[in-house]
Amino acid sequence: MATTAKEIKEFEEKQEWWWVAEKTRSSRLDYLRKAVWKKGALGGNYAPGIEIDLEFPELYTETWQENEGDPIMLRKAKSIGNVLENLPIFITDQSQIVGCVGSAPHNIVSYWQGASMINEEIYNEQGILPQPEEKSLERLAALNEYWGGNTALDELAKVLDPEDAVKFMSGAIGWGTPSSAVGYATKDFRHIGKGFENIIEEIDENMERTDKLLRGNPSPDLLPLYDKLPRWEAMQEVLDAAIEYAARYARLARIIAENFETDPKRKEELLRIAETCERVPAQPPRTLQESIQYDHFVQVVVRYETYEGAMPHRPDYLHGPFFDKDVNINKSITRDDALDLLGEHLIRTYEIGIFSPRWTREGLQGITGTWVWTMGGVNEDGTDACNDCTTAYMQVARLVRIANPTFSFRWHPKVKDELMREIFECIRHGLGYPSLRNDPILVENAMYWHGHPLREARQWVTQSCMSPCPPTKYGCQPFRMASATANCAKIVEYTLHNGYDNVVNMQMGPKTGNAVDFKTYDEFFEAWTKQMKWLLNILVRTVALGRAKDPEFFSRPILSAYYERAVETGTDAVDYTNGERGNAWVTAFTWVENADSLAAVKKLIYDDKKYTMAELIEALKNNWDGKEEMRLDFVNNAPKWGNDDDYVDDIMVQCLKTTAAHGKEIKCVCGNNIPILPENVSGNIHYANVVSALPNGRRLGDALYDGGISPGPGLDKKGPTAVLKSCGKIDHVLDGRAFLLNQRLSPTQLAGEKGYQLWKSYVKSWDDLGMDHVQFNMVDDSTLRAAQKDPEKYQEVIVRVAGYSAHFVDISRKTQDNIIQRTVQGLG
Amino acid sequence: MASCNECKSFFSLEDDDSMGDCVRRIVDPRQAYYQAKPVEADNDSSNCASFQKK
Amino acid sequence: MKCVACGFEGPVDKFRYLYNARIDASMSMRQCPKCNEWNAVDELKDEALEIVNPGDAPWGKSAGIEGISA
């Protein structure tokens, strides 16, 4: 029975936005949204029915084994080629955009060339093996036996300093894999947009020119050229395979249209799919459908090469001109048709599923990767880049309500009010996105830290959750954050325990002295500084070596073909000598605990002398057991970040400035600076059982604070303006690369026009204080508690976890409680 | 011995009739879709549960 | 301490510490070693107060205006 306008109004009044979405979206989007499989791990485990794809690694390994004598990039290109040409493909009913990573809709994939420890984890993972399980185990055993000891990470382990390797892999001080087997890379869309056939031609010309040189006068300059030829051949191989992969979809669409489909309208759609896939990615797109399909092929194909866990991307900028041409100028499609295409673009991206090891699943609960799409912003000349397609993406996001991809909106003073209202509607509907990024601040930041030229800095995309990167010839970043992710609460923990880690029971940091002997707070802070430098250094050192060795141990033929600088020079995209400017940062997980803990130590040990350092250390070693009154004293009677209190805010700024100074001393493989970037994804939950008790009052086991500069949940007691004022004391250009702030707002307070105006004036204060980021949760306690109690009824409730969103029912109970505990700020 | 090219699901390549796609309609718990799997025309299909003579 | 669900009695540290209900309150969640139920525990009194089921929030409303409107 059709839903009436009255019923929809009732859902709106009750703020049950998921019902509003279901009742108002097109029947196609409704089918496709419900059809897509949920591939993010649910609180750590995969949903029933999700299966690991074994055909993909078998096809890959078969060709890999046959081409042992080839240089690595060519060997890899042939292996990917075999996969793209022979892995089963599928087209879902009602779908208009095709392409998936995996041979069936419920499949997730993994990359056996990457890391033995991940391969072994798949063997032992319950519930994801295709039936019969016994047969799958045999197939897995064969794969693991072949790759065991020979993966990219196994090779890297052979060259790492053993002590660094043990500490890096302990799981205590940071996370990440120092290989592009697990990472993310910016895409050079201006180059890719030429069309794959044109890139192949460019490579042909480079090879011909080189070939001529090699037949000329001998010279030492000729020697490196010999290695370039097989790399170019590899790039051509994968581009050809990608064109063939698209042609296979065209063929399947025609077979369905001509042999199975009886509905003339669907037949027409299938023939359009066929024509689209015959055009792209071989040639540049001409229409909105071709542009989206091209973009999707680019993203899918590269995920047959490696686990790309993020999606640096600016889709409104890329597709905006086609949207405008088709919808507004030529009127070849209606706006509703366009919304169907954009909505399916979101759904098809959500469909990509990649196996994650357990530690990643805990740190990124509910999603496969942080597909954060960058929207809005400015053009190279500084004019407003927002367009009708930006608005349409905001509108369709509310209709399909998926948690991945999410949007990061590049706010600037020229953004029109109509678009701000669309953004606010997304937040009010509880999506948790878009996050707001302050464009002028981040452009300046990109120039300050990495020397990106102004016109390039203005093109920035979100490299993963937060860090901006220009997607330009020399700006593109091919390798994760090219540095590391640090569990920063360990800095203050090791300062207190002379570098010893009481959780993993080993000496990790340097012996900076027994904290009991520190006579002043300055001595304590000096030890903190040494621990901070040690932590950043060991992580950056390890990942930098992984980066340098990556072309030799892993290799990226597809990404290389996507990079103009790699095509031009015949190098691997990850090769740091091909002109890359450098855009590295260290992601600083669990950062704010340092400020609150240092403030507590300064106040209660050194200033008030209420407790001795020996008493504190004893209490911490016993996880505050039997010391509840003392623990509450450290929580409630020491200043806490986020209350506009200079005592603790000055400490926060001192920590950041000290770390920023070190960020100018340490260099990435390109020789550029490495600022920190405080944020957490759901690392605050993952590290809850890794970080021991701290002077801010937390015990081992308690969730850490959720944001990069968000106050502790419930500890920001003076309202949203005080939070902003504290965060505004940070220099968001000089003190780090970006700073994640989570805020929880009340959906009741922010209803209607009054709510929008309150939010808009909040955004103005945020900008006035020079902050670079803020994101909002706008779902009330009662809805979240009801969802905990009756998850089946609340499948579509979305929350902002950290740099990403997730369906509330897909995250662990502990993460759910952590979100509920966050302070609900009243505006105005 | 039955071979793939005798099956209703087999669609040979335009430029090479020794190869083709096995195209099948699949309905899983969430969605319906057509899947294409590359196969050789003379592939032995006597053990294929989905074999349907043309 | 005595488990509210099954009556098991033992010292508080025999109940596995899970996490705090909120950092600035003396309440935490601990798991009974016998029946595995989650008990809300007053850490100042070493006393189990109630069983915590999904959706229960023994710490009350969130801080901020959510708390004020309670």
Image: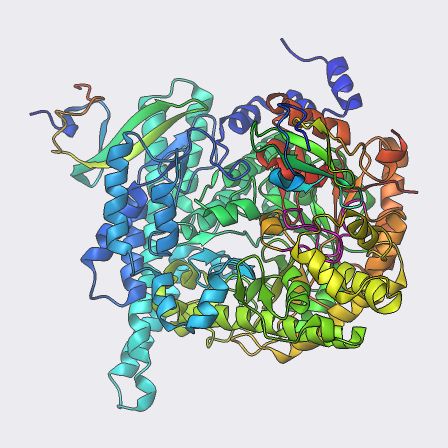
Q: Residue A613 lies in magenta, yes or no?
A: no
Which quadrant of the figure has residue A521? bottom right
In the depicted view, which residue is nearer to us: C42 or A475?
C42
Q: Residue A696 lies in magenta, yes or no?
A: yes
In the depicted view, which residue is nearer to us: A329 or C66?
C66
Q: Is residue A659 among what the camera can see?
A: no
Which residue lies most toward the top here?
A: A1
Residue A354 picture location, percent across and down: 44, 44
Residue A410 picture location, percent across and down: 71, 54
Which quadrant of the figure has residue A428? top right
Magenta region, residue range: A692-714
Residue name at image x 45 percent, y 71 percent: A163
In the depicted view, which residue is nearer to us: A355 or A186?
A355
Residue name at image x 19 percent, y 22 percent: B51
Residue name at image x 27 percent, y 61 percent: A75
Q: Give the answer, above or below, for where A681 lies relative to A770.
A: above
Answer left or right for A813 relative to C48: left
Which residue lies most toward the left here?
A: B1
Residue name at image x 75 percent, y 77 percent: A523
